[in-house]
Image (tube, rainbow, N blue to C red):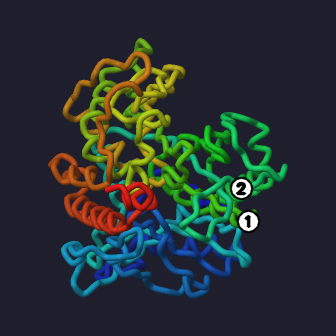
Amino acid sequence: MSALKKRSDDNKTIVYSPDVDMADTPAQENAAEIRAWLEANEISEVECLVPDMTGNARGKFIPAHQFLSRGDLKLPESIMVQTVTGEYTDEHWDFVEPTDTDMLLVPDPNTLRKVPWAREPTAQIIADCYKASGEPHPLASRNVLKHIIKLYAEAGLRAEVAPEVEFFLVHKNTDPDYELMPPKGRSGRREVARMSFSIDAVAEFEDFVEDMYDFADEQALSVDTLIHENGAAQLEINFNHGDPLDMADQVFVFKRTVRETAQRHNMYATFMAKPMQKEPGSALHIHQSILSLATGDNIFNGADDRPTPELMHYIAGLQRYTPDLISFYAPNVNSYRRLAPDISAPINLSWGYDNRTTAFRVPDSTPINRRLENRFPGADANPYLAIAASLASGLLGLEHKLQPTPPHQGTANDDSVEVARSLEEAVRRLNANTDLARVMGDLFLRAYAAVKLDEFEEFNRVISSWEREHLLLQV
């Protein structure tokens, strides 16, 4: 059998409810499918994974025979409102039950994959989170994206996305006080020059690349091309287009895969938005197109093969709501070092045709493949939330028939900055919009803001070397 069970077309939601006979629900059918897959692949251990608010994996390691025999799987819901450092906010109990109750985990059989780097035959499966009542848990980022997909379906639409993921390979660094540096390649030297699209520069890390592709193939990740980006030892992987939930799952798994592969080759892989002062940042660009459920046609392409009003509404939605949602694209204090002038990242809300200096780009393509690229998200973004925020903005633009600015001519880097320059500034805008609360969930937005403000305050207590160097004796 393949490493990944094919996602079903109906994408059913499976709910474990304590008041329902499980034999009469699709959950029992899914359990049988999972059992067959685990037995066919002779799996001895299962990683049951839940993406947390940061997009990192939480969960449990479970022996396969126990995973098959357990009637339910649980995790405390408090893990959904922890900061990136593992701390809790002062408002913690405003978002979860004071008893710190458990969430019910419902493994999604469509996400079954082998863990190719494990020593024992191991499977990984992503679980959805539910309350004891059977309702999708409102603080789970995967549920936020699933809700946006449902809203599209109710509007007679289906989204497709294609992520582009950038990352750096870095020399192993166990002391956070030291700056990062590129690892040595097979030549024994470190990169020092700009090597965009260089084949030879990629070949410096040939062993890493080959293992990464082998691991991706074993997990049925739909990775397409790999290129060397502008930074030293900076690579980019493009994914084929597909269902938004499936692509978010794949990026989630891919980031784990890259880190594990790098460890095998005695180096680190980092998805920090701006890991090194003198190098560019890393992005998670999201290409997106919208199809009609009734006809299957791309609504961004008209009968005359020209851009449609729907494309303009969609772009306008991104322009309108990105300032409020920028913290989903730039979720960490480090993220805003990337969103700065003159380092190949967007700084304003411009859009244009095949213009990489704009935030929202309509790439040059055949009319049937017309799409929009959102260039704001950083590689450190939670893929579920970045995709959800982008699709939500476009949907609201379609709903309200918003109109965009004229397409930008020339470079947009010379224009003024129009987005937040710090995590605090970004998060304080998040709760000001009732439209966003409606489509993404009021409780989730408030919890996310509380977590991120707490992270900012924790970071703000750290005194930097710049402050000691320039202020210690000069002020």
**Extreme-front residue of the structure:** 473
User: Residue 157: horizontal and vertical position, in percent?
Assistant: 35, 38
Q: Which residue is mark 2?
A: 183
On screen, residue 330 versus residue 277, left or right, reads left
Amino acid type, label 1: Asn
Asked which quadrant contains residue 77, the reply is bottom left
Q: Nearer the viewer, residue 373 or 102?
A: 373
- Compare residues 162 and 146 and report the one nearer the observer: 162
Label 1: which secondary element: loop
- Residue at 53 percent across and 40 percent down: it is 241
The residue sitting at the top extreme is: 304
Res 7 visible: no
Q: Are marks 2 and 1 in contact (CB under 8 Å)?
A: yes
Q: Is residue 68 above or below residue 397?
A: below
Q: Kindly identify the residue that appears in the image at 21 percent across and 49 percent down.
A: 429
Secondary element type, mark 2: loop
Where residue 239 appears, as percent x and y from the top left, is: 58, 44
N-terminal label among 2 and 1:
2
Report the quarter where the N terminus lies. Answer: bottom right
Report the residue at 59% width, 70% height from top. Answer: 175
| Image coordinates for residue 124, horizontal then vertical, percent | 58, 70
Q: Is residue 401 visible?
A: yes
Quadrant holding the C terminus: bottom left
Q: Given the image, on which type of amino acid does mark 2 rest? A: Pro
Residue under circle 1?
266
Q: Is residue 87 above or below residue 108?
A: below
- Give the residue at x 67% y 40%: 228
Mark 2 crowd level (few <14, some 14–19, many ≥20, 10 Å Cα): many
